[in-house]
Amino acid sequence: MAIFGTKKKADALKSTAEVATTAKASGTPVMRTGLHAVIVGPRITEKAALTAETNVYVFDVATTATKRTIAEAINMLYKVMPVSVNVINIPRKRVIVRGKKGMKGGGKKAYVYLKAGDKIEII
């Protein structure tokens, strides 16, 4: 005899459509699925701007993203096929702000290489 009841998996899991609509109404971040969830956004730095001149673009990506899913997401979002993709893990860093210790979140970034004629417009 168990103290805590167990819920069925069907009751415990909501569909992604229900989660998205309830999250938009409540103002909480929307959980994205599929290839749209792979690319978090472009990485806007001085180094990234310099590499963009040589057809290398830098993106922040999800920590679960792979080179293949990143290439598919770039193809779907920007309609260009990458020649290659390099992925780099960014480690977490310890910081002290106003005497309190904390951590800067790490993540993952991807260098996307394109052919000479291709271009990505980042707004």
Image (cartoon, helix red, strand yellow):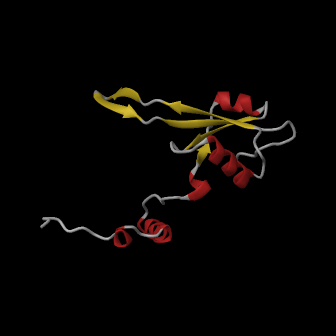
Q: Is residue 2 left or right of residue 51?
A: left
**Which quarter of the figure has residue 103?**
top left
Q: Residue 53, relative to residue 60: is it above or below?
A: above
Q: Is residue 28 left or right of residue 64?
A: left
Instruction: Please state which of residues 33 and 10 is positioned toward the viewer in this rendering.
Output: 10
Q: Position of residue 64 (x, y in %)?
A: 51, 45
Instruction: Please state which of residues 82 and 97 is positioned toward the viewer in this rendering.
Output: 82
Q: Position of residue 3 (x, y in %)?
A: 12, 65
Residue at the spot x=46%, y=71% of the render?
18
Total number of numbered discs in the rendering: 0
Q: Is residue 122 left or right of residue 107?
A: right
Instruction: Please state which of residues 118 and 72 is positioned toward the viewer in this rendering.
Output: 72
Q: Where is residue 60 in the image (x, y as percent from the top left)?
A: 58, 40
Q: Most extreme residue toward the front, as rendered?
A: 1
Residue at the spot x=57%, y=43% of the render?
61
Residue at the spot x=78%, y=48% of the render?
80
Question: Which quadrant does the N terminus fall into?
Answer: bottom left
**Which quarter of the figure has residue 112?**
top right
